[in-house]
Amino acid sequence: MLFKLSLSNIRKSLRDYAIYFFTLIIGISVFYVFNAVSGQVAMTVIDTDGREVARILQMGISAMSVFVAGVLGLLIVYASRFLMKRRNKEFALYLLLGMGKGKISAILLLETVIIGLGSLGVGLLLGIGLSQIMSALVVSLFEADMTRYSFMVSGDAIKMTVICFAVMYLVVMIFNSVIISRFKLIDLMHSGKRSEQIKLKNPVICVIIFLIAAAALGYAYYQVGWNYGEVTGKKMALYITMGAVSTFMIFWSVSGMLLRIVMSMKNVYFRSLNAFTFRQISSKVNTMVFSMTVICLMLFVTICALTASFSMRNSMNANIEELCPADFELSANLNEPVENLDIVSECKDKGLDIMAYAGEYTRFYTYGDADFSLEEFCGEEAERIKAEFIFLDYYTSEQLIGLDEYNALMDLYGKEPLTIGNDEYILLCDFKSMKAIRDSVLQADGDITVYGKTLHSKYDECQEGFISISAQHINAGIFVVPDSILEGQTPSGDFIIGNYKAADKAGKTETEQALRHEYDSIRQDLSGLSVHKVGGYFGLSTKIDLTSGAVGLGAIATFMGLYIGLVFLIACGAILALKELSESVDSIGRYEMLRKIGADESDISKSLFRQTGIFFLLPLLLACVHSVFGMKFAAFFLEVFGTEKMAESIAATSIIILLIYGGYFLITYYCSKSIIKERK
């Protein structure tokens, strides 16, 4: 009997359960997809480094899944509150007919189990299907062999999903039982008849608070966007707190100002159903100031996380193509000049014969004048720059390279050579923050003195360029000078950069393994090498190793950004949707009154559409404003990886928000429209 009643209730309430089902199904599918990712990575990636990335990725996703489960659990409880409120009169009827609260709890228990099993089954099926699409992203990120792919169902991911959501449903059952035990018949019968009185806030106070909040936000924006060089951990915490409090103050003041502003515009306020529309909006925002604040901040995190992860991934892929045009680099960059520096011979004596693996290569030296450091380069600008950028190393010698050796390296890289006069130099720099500092010096003067000779900059700004292979734009400054300046000077850096003898991928992989084995054998004991005597950097960089590291870091950033972004979007959309639907239930009588006084159905639909649209748009608009300055601050940290293709990253983020957040908006509008028509 109770089972049949539960099934009947679910069939009759499918319209009301739309948002609930939508949230559960998407939440379950997203939960499964990301917990199955590591298995897909391990399946499609052959090399050891890729499998290590899969292990790290699994650890990160598992840790994040605990947080995600908590967010989804709160959503399910919140959704249950809406459904309980929606059915108050139904429960009142049960009590009038003599049904005990225990049986009502049993009905809800059966409904929760049925809905849970149904949504779990559909969500897992959708997740399994989407995970196969995710495999294409895995293959793209890891440049894996798609022929190794086969249809995969992750038993561990299914097990974890079932356990987490079973716990969530159990919490909902307990929550429903507690709510039912507190039912009072009189309250259930009169639910929906109590109208909320809109209290107009003092407009002067609202304007003052709005201006204070805007000023505080502006100050925080400036500090993190333009004065980030002085931002410490404590200051960052202060600016985040200021942003959160200011966001709350803005929503509080807007909830009081919006209606007042529209009311002052008589031609707008009394047109069509605008008076009703804006009173409804003001009421909703007024009762959801804290929730709006949380949703706005979650959307801000979502936009920044998605955009940053996409940008990082796109930039690192582009960087490998641009900044790693050779197969290997063995280099020693020492703290001071060394006579007869020959790192190749020193390594060969220790057991690493780089020449046995090298095909086409170039060998060159770099130099450092003890009297020419960043401080000397800055000249009259030094004090200003030191005050603004306190963390820079102003006393280490600048790196110099001769023109002919640099052009030989560019020939290997397939890039255009440079030309300079006997009294000229060119400064190469691709690290954006450092480039801005150096450009200001070049534009002010730019003359330098190297080994007692004065040189003039050929250009009034840094040129793009580098010598070492890398996966990031990390060249903070290299001076290309005439060869005559360096004649007879003692070098402080020794570089050999080239390509392997092997031409195909398999051959290069085999060469890489053998070279790495020899290098690891001498890296443990650097005694006898010049770097051991005077200090500095010694290392082997390879394209395969840099690519693997970039791919792994890009993959982790992409998956973690997507995971938290999607879950936060689901949470924001669901909270707003459920609040709007709850308001629609409470406002059925108001819409009936509009019909009785002659309002057209089309005008009522337009009013509902505007209410829903503005309700969803308000937190998103402020989140977008936050994100503009948040991404400006994030770009300071992202520039080492590169911020290329930012427009593509923003476009991808916008599409995801449009699909999920916009999907919630449309479902909410049509469900609300259906609710207010039920007693037409």
Image: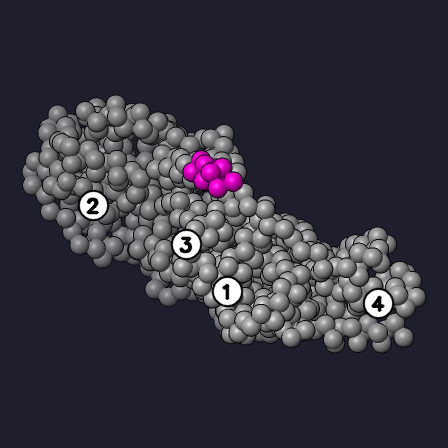
Mark 1 sits on what residue? 273
User: Circles 1 and 3: CB distance less than 8 Å?
Assistant: no
| Residue under pointer 3 | 265
Give residue 277's position: percent from left, percent from top.
52, 61
Question: Does residue 581 appear anywhere in the picture?
Answer: no
For marks 3 and 4, give the CA distance. Answer: 46 Å
Left or right of residue 542: residue 183: right
Q: CA distance from mark 1 to mark 3?
A: 14 Å
Q: Which residue is mark 4?
A: 93
Which sits in the foreground, 311 or 412? 311
> Which mark is first along the chain, 3 or 2?
3
Residue 159, image quadrant: bottom right
Place of residue 480 in the rendered image (x, y in percent of width and height, measured from the top left): 18, 40
* Distance of label 1 from label 2 (alpha carbons): 61 Å
Q: Amino acid at mark 4?
A: Leu
Q: Is residue 60 above or below residue 28?
A: above
Residue that badge 2 annotates: 463
